[in-house]
Image (cartoon, rainbow, N blue to C red):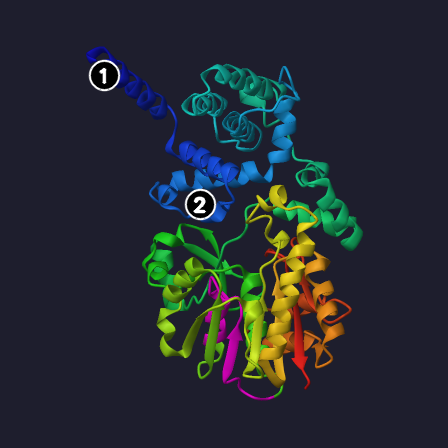
Amino acid sequence: MAQSSGEAQQRLRQKKSQSADISPARRAAFDVLMAMERGRSHADELLRGKAVADLGHADRNLTTALVLGVLRWQIRLDEETKKFLTRPGARLDEAVRLALRMGAFQLLFLDRVPAHAAIDESVELAKRAGHRFAAGMVNAVLRKVAAERGGAERRFEAFSVLEEDFIAAYPEWMVHRWERFFGAEATFGICRHGQQPPRLALRSVDARTEAELAAEGVRLEPAEMLTPARIITAGDVTVTEAFREGRVRVQDEGSELIGEIAACAGEMDGRKPERILDLCAAPGGKTLILAERNPEARIVACEASSARMAKLRERLAGLGERVEFRSADAAELNDEGAFDVALADVPCSGTGTLGRNPEIRHRLREQDLVRQAERQRAILRTALRAVRPGGSVVYSTCSLEPEENEDVVRAVLAECAMAHVVPVGACIKGLESRGVLAAGAAERLHGCVTPEGALRLMPGVFWTDGFFVVLLERSA
């Protein structure tokens, strides 16, 4: 019995020793990637979790770079390591596969990471996951990857990302459909944009708060499209007092623009909106813009998920009784003509957010788009039914796919004679006249308006996620 206890303690000491050889950032990144392999969790949610939040600033940054980098370049990384496997067609355990991807990503893309650190810690990660025999293979493959790039000291001089590498980082079916719908040049722009870290935009930054953030090491610059937004160029805003108190919030500029268009749409017929419906309100960034632009209006915020509703209530608590929360499926609301404006920012495939959510490319299947569209049509019907005659509906997605965008609008209008499309250019002009748009942004946005009058923000045109927005008016 004493011998068994001693053996257990020895194994525990060995495990701790192995863990100590792995940096906190690499351990955290590996755990996040493993959680994603084993479930349907999203990278952004896991990277906001306590295990990552408890890391120091530098380790959090490295963890994020490793997770998102591996996901962005996964297809290329698998091809690169497969060349050096004795049996390239063999199915590897998920932990071994991730150790190889993490090591190869650091060797090929992170020029400040020493080769020995990338290789040795990837080997330790494989051991930590219980694959001591496979650890030798991980070591051998990664050393060959480094050697092919000119050795540990010169590997970056021999490696560069080519145009075809950006394209090859996405599933072929995805690239082919983009080329068919948007052309080769736009497709390359989408792919290149999705391989780069997204720019972080802040909302609600006044001069005093900007100075406060600067004192805490957060540097900002004007945003591309919107005057209320700023782009973070340095520092960690999440540890600042302004962020903790909710005086500033991180929100993609394209997402902010949708909120601004919805606020503008509520005044298209010359009335100030009194009742606004946000059908898919979580996480609440667009709801806050609607409230900011319409201080006298009452807003009904709907959300089907109880967990997301809890977070939505917390985020919008400062609005008090101006907001009515409804835990309800947006497709099943029965309100008839009760609202002046409705925002239907519907759940979608998210292919416009591949730089921010790179895992989507590995999970999405083309047939999923049709299933998404069924629900999107139902939500849009609900929105049109909910607004009064003369009221406005803004339908939006963060998808690039016609099945979720033009096809949804076309199908609903074909069965619903009481509504029509209003060209979004009028809202763009309105936002420009109010000083909401940055200098030159209106002209660029007019260039993104489709022949049908919708707005399509393509990744690579602006430094934002991709969005589709159409404005509808109920005529009867």
Which quadrant does the C terminus fall into?
A: bottom right
- Amino acid beneath label 1: Ser
Task: Look at the numbered discs 1 and 2 and tell me whether their residues touch, using CB distance below 8 Å.
Answer: no
Question: What is the C-alpha distance between the residues marked 1 and 2?
Answer: 36 Å
Q: Position of 275 compared to 453: left or right?
A: left
Label 1 SS: helix
Magenta stretch: includes residue 276:
yes
Dot 2, crowdedness within 10 Å: few (<14), some or many (≥20)? Answer: some
- Camera-side residue: 371 or 296? 371
Image coords of residue 147 (percent x, y):
59, 18
- Camera-side residue: 60 or 266? 266
Confirm whether residue 438 shows in the render: no
Magenta stretch: includes residue 392:
no
Image label count: 2
Image coords of residue 235 (percent x, y):
41, 50
State the residue lying farthest toward the bottom. 270
Q: Magenta span covers which residues? A: 270-291
Which quadrant does the N terminus fall into?
A: top left
Residue at 47%, 75% in the rendered image: 300
Image coords of residue 250 (percent x, y):
46, 58
Q: Is residue 476 above or below residue 223?
A: below
Dot 1, crowdedness within 10 Å: few (<14), some or many (≥20)? Answer: few
Q: Which mark is residue 5?
A: 1
Residue at 39%, 54% in the rendered image: 237
Residue at 50%, 82% in the rendered image: 275
Confirm whether residue 150 shows in the render: yes
Q: Which mark is residue 46?
A: 2
Please tell me in which quadrant of the rendered image residue 137 appears: top right
The numbered mark, 1 or 2, whose residue comes first in the sequence reads 1
Q: Which mark is residue 297?
A: none
Image coords of residue 138 (percent x, y):
52, 19
